[in-house]
Image (cartoon, coloured by chain):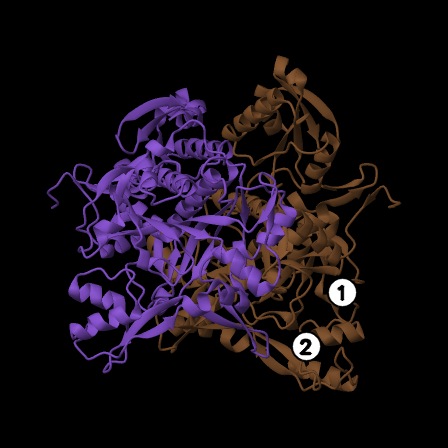
Chain colours: A purple, B brown
Amino acid sequence: MVEKKSEKLKSIDELYTFCKKKGFVFKSSELYNGLAGFYDYGFLGVELKNNILKNWWNDFVRLRKDIIGLDGSIISKKKVWDASGHTKNFNDPLVQDLKTKKYYRADHLIEEQLKISVDGKTIEELQRIIEENNLLSPEGNPISKIKVFNLMFPVNIGAEGTVIAFLRGETAQSIFINFKNIIDTGRVKLPFGIAQVGKAFRNEISPREFLFRQREFLQMEIEYFYNPEYESVEYELEKDENFLEFEFYFLSSEEQILKEKNERKIKKIRMKELLEQKKIKKIHAYWLYKSLKWYYKFLKEENLRVREHLKEELSHYSSATFDIEYNFPFGFKEIFGIADRGNYDLSQHQKYSGKSLEFFDEKTGKKIVPNVIEPSFGFDRFFMALIIDSYFYEEERGNVVLKLHENISPYKIAVLPLVSNKKELLDKSFEVYYYLLKNSEFNIFFDKSGSIGRRYARQDEIGTPYCITIDFDTLNDDSVTVRFRDSKKQKRIKIQSILNEIKKL
Amino acid sequence: MVEKKSEKLKSIDELYTFCKKKGFVFKSSELYNGLAGFYDYGFLGVELKNNILKNWWNDFVRLRKDIIGLDGSIISKKKVWDASGHTKNFNDPLVQDLKTKKYYRADHLIEEQLKISVDGKTIEELQRIIEENNLLSPEGNPISKIKVFNLMFPVNIGAEGTVIAFLRGETAQSIFINFKNIIDTGRVKLPFGIAQVGKAFRNEISPREFLFRQREFLQMEIEYFYNPEYESVEYELEKDENFLEFEFYFLSSEEQILKEKNERKIKKIRMKELLEQKKIKKIHAYWLYKSLKWYYKFLKEENLRVREHLKEELSHYSSATFDIEYNFPFGFKEIFGIADRGNYDLSQHQKYSGKSLEFFDEKTGKKIVPNVIEPSFGFDRFFMALIIDSYFYEEERGNVVLKLHENISPYKIAVLPLVSNKKELLDKSFEVYYYLLKNSEFNIFFDKSGSIGRRYARQDEIGTPYCITIDFDTLNDDSVTVRFRDSKKQKRIKIQSILNEIKKL
């Protein structure tokens, strides 16, 4: 048996087994032996997903006067991706096993075999490292020279097969190409943001680590447009908090160079230090802060760190980028990136479309093509981090407890009749179940089969924070037992007070 | 000027102009002159969309013990679509203009030129009609013989380009291929349903009528599995209503044959008449009823009718299908279909995967491959119908009033300071705005620019049911003026009572 009192997930295999067993995530096309890089969210996964998306939209759109939403199509015209640089630059370096003909990511091959980081190295540098070290394929065969492989998925539209379009490689471009529509119709003023939740697609050569590197994935993104002339002082910040004093784990670019991955020095830093070191602009820092705060609601602070991108590693559009990384079983890895894209994208679209994307800024009285900060949240990676962070096998209970934040757990409440063979008790339980459903917006589970202990355990495992047991006393006094997931404490309360009590907590 | 007191939208062009101007919908890739068959939801469209989806999920998943959700990937394996029959049967009949080389749908060409309905005709029959009538292309040129054109979008996965997958042509298959995972892990009992909201893709040869016939579209679907042995009596229905007495406009298959489209006789019928005529099974009728009830919340009953599919028109998987049609400016057209798919899909997947999809039914003690009823809601067509149904130009006000159901309007409340140049008033207005945001889940708009009349008009146009004006009296007595969209009536109430008053309405 397990020896420790409480145990975490130790591997991605264990994570997938749990996710499948509980109905969080299934392999896509699994009936036909799966399709690498694609997953389906199951009956619990979709509820957790909806709750996360709602929470994100609430914080970043509903509660903010300066951000509006958008939902662009997945397929878009080739010209969009020519302008953005994706058809030319959105590539991975591949090598081919000359015997098996299988392809591998050159950078991953080097990192795995030499245990070094090659973030930001050029194709030529990677090639040189491969040759100097006489690297072979994972099967031990000779490999080809590096070839660049474009990650965009082309799609032919129409019967003639001549119109080539693409599945979007990032949701961001849907926002940039709608910039004109939005400034023409949206009554917006600088600074303002456009937020979007949507799917993006990348033809990853070796999808891996479950939801981490998929070919189809969900992004939650904001493009926050501002005028660099006054970004550092005049935009509207929340007045109640001094984000410059905000502290977080940070890995600087200097500390990464030539160090082994995951053994770098990580220390706590205050946001103002980054500004003093001129590593970040104030508006960029503000959005990094807001994003971290969102993650802190759901993940443990010690499992999160901010990593500064190396100069060489910056995307073709970015002048500075920071990642938020989560401490996965396979090391600290990116779950979020925040780039300063300057006005690269809007300028490119202006050039390629021949249409002006200048915007009149009332504050300066001048027309500008605004700069943009892009906080980009990977949904699926967060989902994975969330399960890992919340998962505890508790020896004392003999079951897993999924300590999800109660605002996003798939179900908020489970209604459990003490026994299932008494009609009176079942009827009363249904009554309570429907009462709670109709008087709240919560997801509520009803379960009558198995011992009450077994049913508590089932709810622990899917993260339901409150179990409500209907027993024979309920029939007389309209009170129920509420059982709390994390403490296992129980409390007797009146049916009419359940929702208020829960809202208070 | 306009002469009538209240005027509806008259054309799809007028609808698009309105949707664009207000930020509901933009043409996708419009900056690059658009991509036919693709649209983006704008800042108001995405809020309306989110509210609709939430309402649908609430009614069909959250409030039902017998339905669980799923969210499958868009890209799936070719074998899935071989099994479902889509790679072979999911075709449109095309003719090519021999001069311009442009393609046209053969059935649309006939319907437009001869003003007859060809629903359910075979390729051979269509070809004969074209030849007998010497039909030409819309440009007046000779046309080719009919060719079949497959509507699925293939996608190459991986670097070798050998794994062919498809963008899903319908969301339904994500459910069928997960059936095994769900019965293995979901603790479900017959009858039960699996619901999903997600995108599907079809390479339509001539996308048209705005959101009506797109190449990328959103579906809200349920697959409701049942045992045909006892479907007609034992499944759990809502007890408070006799759906057999439910009345609706109905167009039977008999009435359609050889009649001109949209001039057929439509009459009201009770659900039990359909059962008596053996046109529908009871469980099929129940789901048609539930679906109609959902539409009735948002669309006028007289603009909806149920149409029975002709035998020849049934899909390869269906034994009976009914559409719900909406009265668009271009005629009554399908916004919903409910098919009895039997156990065609599960049987096919069983055959193609070699894995058993039998399910043990506790009630009969036998293993079966269950039958399925599929209520399929087209999101985008509903969105379009909703704007058309809600749109009234009111001469008296001099502006459009969008009479959206208040539970789905993009914003529930607008907060309007009477004037914008008094700091005290602005501060108080912000205070009220934040108070309402933080104490509700509503979307709330803040608008300080322009005359109060102009601001009321703006909110009318985007369907906001309640405008709250903060004036100088508010500073003394904490009361505000609530103005109601449809009646224009105004009422003075305390700030603390706003949310309760609105919830009561």
Residue A445 or A92: which is nearer the viewer? A92
In the displayed structure, B1 sits above or below B357; it is above
In the displayed structure, B485 sits above or below A321; it is above
A258 lies left or right of B431: left
Any mark on residue B104, and which? Answer: 2
Q: Position of residue B328 (x, y in %)?
A: 73, 56
Tell which circle, 1 or 2, labels the residue nearer the N-terminal end: 2
Q: Position of residue B431 (x, y in %)?
A: 55, 24
Say which residue appears at 22% left-offset and 52% top-offset. A256
The local crowd at label 1, few if under 14, some if 14 to 19, many if 20 or more residues have their Cα within 10 Å, is some
Say which residue appears at 52% left-offset and 43% top-offset. B58
How far apart, in angstroms, are the residues tagged by discs 1 and 2? 28 Å
For disc 2, the chain is B
Q: Secondary structure at mark 1?
A: helix
Amino acid on which disc 2 is placed:
Tyr
Say which residue appears at 50% left-offset and 57% top-offset. A345
Residue A282 or A448: which is nearer the viewer? A282
Give a yes or no on whether discs 1 and 2 share a subunit.
yes
Q: Which residue is mark 1?
A: B255
Residue A416 or A380: which is nearer the viewer? A380
